[in-house]
Amino acid sequence: MAAATLPARAASLWAPEPDAREASSAQSSYPPLDGDSRVDVTVIGAGITGLSTAVMLKRAGLSVAVLEGRHIGAAATGHTSAKISLLQGTRASTLARSLGEDAVRDHVAAHRAGMGWLLERAADVDCGLERATAVTYSTSAKDGSGARAVRAEAEALRAAGLPVELGTDVGLPFPVTEAVGLGEQAQFDPVPYLHSLATEVHGGGSSVHEGTRVRAASWFGPTEVRTDTGRVRSTWVVVATGIPILDRSLHFARMEPSRSYSLALRIGSPTPPGMYLSADSPTRSIRTARHGDDRLLLVGGNGHRVGTSSPMLSHERDLLDWAEEHWPVEAVTHRWSAQDYQSEDGLPFIGPTPQAPRALVAFGFAKWGMSGGSAAAIALTDHVLGRTTPWLGRMRADRLPRSSRALTTLAQANAQVARHLATGWARPHLPAAHDPAEGEGRVETTVRGKVARCRVGGVLHERSAVCPHLGGIVEWNDAETSWDCPLHASRFAPDGGVLEGPATRGLGTPPGLGSVVRPRA
Ligand SMILES: Cc1cc2nc3c(=O)[nH]c(=O)nc-3n(C[C@H](O)[C@H](O)[C@H](O)COP(=O)(O)OP(=O)(O)OC[C@H]3O[C@@H](n4cnc5c(N)ncnc54)[C@H](O)[C@@H]3O)c2cc1C
């Protein structure tokens, strides 16, 4: 049982929430789109992928409009662990097994290119960029699956030309049975970095617009995207929304969306020197970050499919229990969570799709989007400028599932979607005698259909519980006070507004439902 307590409210250490952001003079904000305009390229999404692409295109002489539904860094990039590394857990050996050594070489080449661009661009930004050794470790028996996976990772990365080293003295306060390390990797604070990119984009015929959600689009001819406050026409559209929106290629059905948790801890002992990821389950991520005068320990893990595994706060408690077994935790300064997407073969989707050749997508970074999103930006820029990207082949967005392993993964993922769709509708969701208490939410079956009821900040919200993307029944996420859809990972605020995922519209408000300040009965 944890001795330290979790903060009442989820907030990322990188502080991408608008309130916190406005308090920092180092960061700016941008006005919503106002009216119609024409540019060379529209970029949807102001995470690392969208903003890096916008900078590269602007440097190439094109005019760019970045449209962001919430605020810069609102989704994964503002809630990431922000390690920049070519050693990525056991990813290389997993790719080697399913796709072969050439795929690992392409993967490493892509991330090396993205990392190189990022490190050069971040070098002059006040974003806590520091070099560190990346480590994948195992604590299970020397002949167990975790330790074997570590050795396989060392082999796969050596074959791809990386100078990794095996050893067990890695600076962790618990016994490690096997570990592989790669020096000179990096970690940073992604939010000032994103703001620096946005500053470079905005002006001189290009612009950044926050609070501007794209609701609809025409992908043919000169493309047009439509928002509540205006339209933008352009020759190209870059869809950098984490998972694609308005997706005719059904890419969302080829993604496993996984949500995981992070804690920032003040501890009463020296912090470990490197950046770590466990090869054993449950996955544990460890790094440190400067925060004011402190050096905090950041721990992460306990991932699960979005919209499942309630109550979600239990994952943060479990993570804290684990941290307290190994470090003298004095305080939890921040707790937060985020989601990312993994394709059926583990590689991202980058570039045009056959259904919309002028709409370029980039997603599926499998929790390695700092270098991955920067690499995608390089490839998308190459595509717009008519250049070839040497490592792109296997990551093209128009590829079909290839291996039997990929087809099996895809079938399993879609069987899960079907199961969540059916069970969401079949569950009786009996109405409770009392309104939800503060921070609580539940779905109830009523004469108006399935209703999502929650109370946050003293306000009782009632919305349709049916996700507008493909009709799943949303689940209450008590860690983030949000409604999360288990089908394709759309998430909604207590008042029904879209937070992230493929949905472009919020939860509906049938007649008689809404938000009211109603004291608890
Ligand atoms: C827990 C966790 C830890 C991670 N740790 C690491 C790590 O250590 N290292 C690493 O390399 N990677 C890590 N990742 C992965 C990395 O964070 C992501 O891959 C990366 O941030 C994705 O960036 P993005 O720009 O593609 O998407 P996002 O950052 O999600 O940005 C998409 C943007 O699009 C906007 N948007 C969505 N829909 C619309 C719309 N309709 N109109 C307008 N705007 C819209 C969103 O608001 C959002 O701002 C981690 C991921 C998770 C979940």
Image (spheres, grey):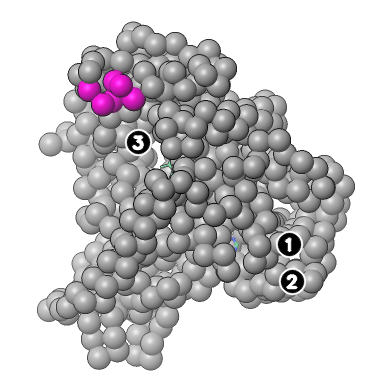
Residue 261, compared with residue 436, is above or below; it is above
Position of the N terminus, as image quadrant, is: top left
Tag 1 near tag 2, CB within 8 Å: yes
Residue 333 place in picture, x, y as percent: 35, 36
N-terminal-most mark, 1 or 2? 2
Q: CA distance from mark 1 to mark 2?
A: 7 Å
Label 3 secondary element: strand
Question: Magenta residues?
Answer: 144-149
N-terminal-most mark, 3 or 2? 2
Label 2 secondary element: loop
Tell me which amino acid carries mark 2. Answer: Phe
Tell me which amino acid carries mark 1. Answer: Arg
Q: Residue 300 bears which disc, if any?
A: 3
Looking at the rendering, which quadrant does residue 486 occupy?
Answer: bottom left
Tell me which amino acid carries mark 3. Answer: Gly
Residue 464, compared with residue 5, is above or below; it is below
Looking at the rendering, which quadrant does residue 66 occupy?
Answer: bottom right
55 left or right of 485? right
237 left or right of 514? right
**58 and 304: which one is in front?**
304
Label 1 secondary element: strand
Crowding near the residue tagged with mark 3, few <14, some 14–19, many ≥20 C-alpha atoms within 10 Å? many
Residue at image position (38%, 22%) is 152
Residue 509, compared with residue 197, is above or below; it is below
Q: Is mark 3 within 8 Å of ligand 1?
A: yes
Residue at image position (58%, 69%) is 248
Q: Which residue is mark 1?
A: 358
Residue 39 place in picture, x, y as percent: 82, 62
Q: Which residue is mark 2?
A: 220
Q: CA distance from mark 3 to mark 2?
A: 42 Å
